Image (spheres, rainbow, N blue to C red):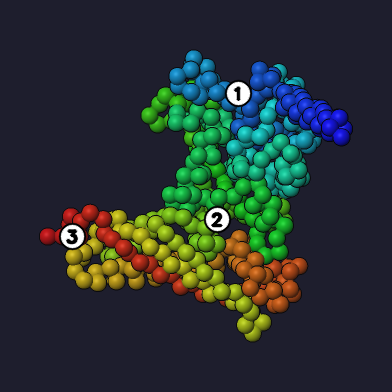
Amino acid sequence: MAYSNGIKVGIQLRGTIITIMIVIVCLLSGCWDRKELRNVSVVTGMAVDKGEHQKYKLTVETTAASEVNPRNAEGYAPANVQSLEGNTIAELTHKFNIVSEQSMILSHMRVLVISEEVAEKGMMEFMDFMDRNREIRDDFDIVIARDGKAASVLKTNNMYKKSASLKVYTQLVSMYKDWGGAPKLRLNDFIRIYKSDGQTPVLVALKVKGDPKKGGNIENMKTITPENKVDVDSLGIIKGGKLVGYISIYDVRNMLWLQGNLKSTVITSQCGSGDKKMSYRVTTSKTDVIATEKGGVPSFTINIKTEGNLQNNECLTNMAKAYAFEGYEEQFNKKMEQEILDTVKTIREQYNADIFGLGERLKDQDYKHFKKYRENWDEGFAKAKVSIHFNTEIKRAGLRKEGAIIK
């Protein structure tokens, strides 16, 4: 019996040793798809223009990490921008070695720039490639180059972010957080909205100011007033996969408010009927939407509640007085209610495109009535009634209760 038990223990021990060895071998083995750093280049931005000889012209920006870091910089160009033409974006990304000696790594891409010309003809063909590619993550911004070439955006240097793509990405993130003039829209968000039944997708539009040929010159980063720069210009409306028009950045902020996606902004209003102004910094914002159908008409009651601080006050009012904020709050409420309604009216009359996602709200809250609009929500949005209730709550007036102009 003891002999038999010894054999069993030996077999178990041998099995354990074999299992450990297999695990160790697996841990020590190399990655089957590894690539040496010296043989690859990290893509930070891509731009799509219409090709001169083939369908597309793809421009790629790769960043030199040593030149971006001021400690290691040797004075060379911080990024490398190259272009190639082809009939599909998938084809171009795989044959880019025609102009580059290194393979491209797409997982760190920050910006995809699409020219206005390409966007107007339709861009869902190559967006399908972006959505399917397993190497591309969804955390990059998609933008439109208005009134110019998409490649020009990637060729414009900046002294704070020496990579054009990283500069644009940081610029859009900051603008969304500080003022609300650019939506936080990633690849998955765009595809989801494009496929939805009750919302029209949008994309931020950039405009290159100055001479595009001087944007890639390193001297452009050494002047106090650069001769070439990239500004956030507006928002492009994408309907049926094509660019149909633009709205202003002020309308973008109102869109974000209706969607409940606004983080922070500043509202400026008049002091009654005079020329003096006051500014209100919104620090928190909450939007509630009640969606239903009444009398065969989609109806939306939108309640927006904000809290914040009075940051600028040219009005001759003593802040130390009780209830001093009430008149200000009423003024801001009237201004924003009218401004948001004007945005809804303008977009409905010009494009009849529900960029606010009201159809999705109706779908979630009253699907019984939404079903008849599922194939054509434009019909429902065209006749929808929208009611805005804006509620401002000023919490404080800064460091002084009395303004500097009060005597």
Vertical position of residue 221 compared to residue 140: above or below: above
Q: Count how many numbered circles sit on residues in the image.
A: 3
- Element at label 3: loop
Mark 2, Cα crowd under 10 Å, few <14 / some 14-19 / many 20+, is some
In this rendering, would 114 be left or right of 96? left
- Percent across and percent down for residue 85 are 74, 30
Residue bearing the label numbered 3: 402
Q: Is residue 383 visible?
A: no
In this rendering, would 361 be left or right of 319? right
- Element at label 2: strand
- Percent across and percent down for residue 392 are 38, 67
Indicate which disc residue 247 carries: 2
Depth order, front residue of 362/118: 362
- Element at label 1: strand
Residue with the most extreme left position: 407
Q: Amino acid at mark 2?
A: Ile
Could you tell me which residue is drawn at 54 percent across and 52 percent down?
Answer: 183
Q: Is residue 262 visible?
A: yes
Depth order, front residue of 395/125: 395
Residue bearing the label numbered 1: 80
Residues tagged 1 and 2 counted as in contact (Cβ below 8 A): no
The quarter holding residue 45 reads top right
- Percent across and percent down for residue 339 are 46, 65
In this rendering, would 291 be left or right of 34? left
